[in-house]
Image (cartoon, helix red, strand yellow):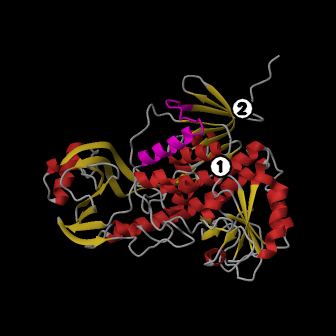
Amino acid sequence: MCAATPPLPVLVVGAGPTGLTLAVDLARRGIAVRIIDKSAGFPRTSRAKGPNPRSLEVLEDLGVLGAVLAAGAAPLPMRKYRGGVAVADAEPFADQRPTPDAPYDRPHMMAQWRLEEVLRDRLAEYGVRVGLGAELVDLAEGDASVTATLAGGERVEASYVVGCDGGHSAVRKLLGVPFEGRTDETGLMVCGDVEVEGLDRGFWHQWFDEDGAVMLCPIPGTRSGWWFQAGPELDADGAPLPPSLAGFRRLFAKHTGLPADRLTRAALLSTYRVNERLAARYRVGRAFLAGDAAHVHSIAGGLGMNTGIQDAYNLGWKLARVVRGQAGPALLDTYEEERLPVAEQVLDVSAERLRATLEAIERPGGGLDAAVGPGTNGLGGGYRWSSLAASPRTTPRLRAGDRAPDAPCRDTATGAPRRLFEVFAGPHFTLLGFGTGTAGALREAAAAHGDDVRAYGVGAAGEPCDLTDAAGHAHTAYGVGPDEDLLVLVRPDNHVGLVAGADEVKAVIEYLGGIPSSGTECRS
């Protein structure tokens, strides 16, 4: 008698940036994953304009940062027009600089389809490829797995299913999760990818007039491609006309004063409405929601794709630990606990940035630079409220749940430069021991947890340590005094899990061993 085939560990539904990030994160942890998408081919949409600073940190950890930087470009200055005349230039990031604790000070512009290519290439290095033309039509949860039925009748049994399938998510609908919110016709736009000749590609051009607007931003990696956004044409009854090449040409000529035939091609046409919606739950039993399947909001601030990437980064290490038996299924409840409040904050930030932008474009010289503001770089986020951040000890600079800062150090053995982000990179926990008094605790924690934890002593020049912090950047970023001995445990998603004294290694070991190791098998 043949033994039953065990279920696939994880099925990811949706192969946009969120689903691909999750699949890469799982695959690098050795978790078998299948990723499917209902599209017949890979879309060439360039909707999102690129990763923000926090997503660049995630992409660095996934090993694709070099490819991302090569495929895109730094944000361009914005040239704003009134009545067809240039009236102001703005560089929203001109005053920002990388710092030792935050190496990326601005977003990186690239077409979404190009980012997806980079992530698919990385996924293929682990032997995983996206299954196209695979539409989910049913989900049925059993005692130890969930069965997904695809159009055409194929059934896929998996331990867990993650819906990364966009705002019209089939997973969310099949789970019956409410997706409440509103649709706002304010800021209605027609969008597309166009070819334009004779326009300076060194600027993001923005024409604003009393009766409409046209915005053209060059698409990195193309010779004459542009992102086109405009207020729609209206019919006699005031209803918006559907986007078309002819309509784009009329809008272009009207607002720019340039010949209509300069705009030679239009593709991927769409009408954009502001939708602000949030899923009531991120987990139903063995199924999860991430990215636009869980939250949609205004494009102001560029937070949509980025929030999805960071959803996946939060969920990946937790799924991997549970699948491997390193933690109990209750750990998976912390995904919703941590990420749903973040989405609520993002909805507020994007709504505020939209309001500020709509007010700005009413004024001569105002433009889309108003969409850049507090909360749009993703670096301030953390999970201080989380049950995984129960450590009572803090420093003047951080506490459990915060994003773990970067810092330039040197490998003490070789003298080579080594950043903390390089130390964190990979699927492990990282234990930093500041001060020579933490050496014993580092050895004990590493011995107790093996490859699951990589321990590093961080010290001043001349001290016995793994990483020399001669300039003090690490001590400053972590709020540790020069004569203080302190342990900082960094989670696999580069957030602080625990802050402890040098004599509190037991707390570190208990934290690692107790990341929920008990609890119900799944939550209904």
Q: Name the residue that disc number 2 marks.
A: 7
The residue drawn where x is 72% and y is 50% is 332
Residue 118: say if magenta: yes
Graded by Cα atoms within 10 Å as few (under 14), some (14 to 19) or many (20 or more), the crowding at tag 1 reads many
Which amino acid type corresponds to the residue marked 2 in the rendered image?
A: Pro
Q: Is residue 157 left or right of residue 232?
A: right
Q: Which residues are magenta?
A: 112-136
260 on left or right of 41: left
Q: Which mark is residue 316?
A: 1
Going 31% across and 50% down the picture, which residue do you hit?
190
Viewer-side residue, 57 vs 160: 57
Q: Is residue 349 left or right of residue 451?
A: left
- The C terminus appears in which quarter of the rendering? top right
In-front residue for pair 16/155: 16
Between 13 and 226, the one lying in front of the other is 226
Q: Residue at x 67, y 54 (%)?
A: 335
Q: Earlier along the polypeptide chain: callout 1 or callout 2?
A: 2
Q: For this rendering, which residue is in front, 74 or 158?
A: 74
Amino acid type, mark 1 = Gly
> Label 2: few (<14), some or many (≥20) within 10 Å?
some
The mark total stands at: 2
Q: Is residue 427 magenta?
A: no
Q: Position of residue 9 (x, y in %)?
A: 70, 37
* Image quadrant where residue 487 sits: bottom right
